[in-house]
């Protein structure tokens, strides 16, 4: 069953995707960050970061080599905060706080 996505959420996801991969700027897939969640569970759509296929699921990726990826790129939460800073500039703190509460 498809989940309903509001216009505000769809606009947010489109803006996240328009950023391009956080590592290389290629067209991204949206990665739902995992903080304190198990396998098979994903966070809210508000908690997505843009990563190309290679950096999402490839050899050097958040899924393929998470420890190395985090050492070089930062934690998923740090990357999410950077996405919110980029999208919402000086107004990022409130939406970022709300997104963190959905993890």
Image (spheres, grey):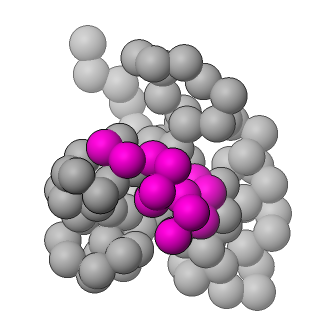
| Left/right of residue 14 with respect to residue 100 in the rendered view | left
The quarter holding residue 24 reads bottom left
Q: Position of residue 37 (x, y in %)?
A: 60, 24
Q: In the image, what residue occupies the spot 72% across and 60% down?
A: 96
Q: Quadrant of the N terminus?
A: top left
Label tally: 0
Q: Residue furthest top?
A: 1
Is residue 93 positioned above or below 2 on the image? Answer: below
Q: Residue furthest bottom?
A: 90
Would residue 32 be seen by someone viewing this image from the given angle? yes
Q: Position of residue 86 (x, y in %)?
A: 57, 82
Q: In the image, what residue occupies the spot 51% across and 49% down?
A: 67
Is residue 99 positioned above or below 2 on the image? Answer: below
Q: Quadrant of the C terminus?
A: top right
**Is residue 13 in the magenta section?**
no
Q: In the image, what residue occupies the spot 77% across and 39% down?
A: 101
Q: In the image, what residue occupies the spot 55% across and 36% down?
A: 34
Q: Please give the range of residues in magenta.
A: 64-76
Would residue 31 be seen by someone viewing this image from the given angle? no
Magenta span dominant secondary structure: helix
Front in this rendered view, residue 60 or 34: 60
Q: Position of residue 77 (x, y in %)?
A: 65, 55
């Amino acid at each position: 069953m498809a989940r309903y996505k509001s216009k505000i959420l769809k606009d947010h996801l489109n803006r996240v995707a328009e950023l391009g991969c956080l590592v290389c700027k290629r067209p991204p897939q949206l990665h739902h960050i995992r903080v304190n969640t198990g396998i098979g569970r994903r966070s809210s759509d508000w908690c997505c970061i843009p990563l190309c296929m290679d950096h999402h699921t490839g050899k050097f990726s958040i899924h393929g080599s998470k420890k190395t990826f985090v050492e070089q790129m930062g934690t998923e939460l740090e990357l999410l905060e950077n996405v919110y800073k980029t999208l919402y500039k000086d107004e990022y703190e409130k939406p970022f706080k709300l997104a963190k509460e959905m993890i």
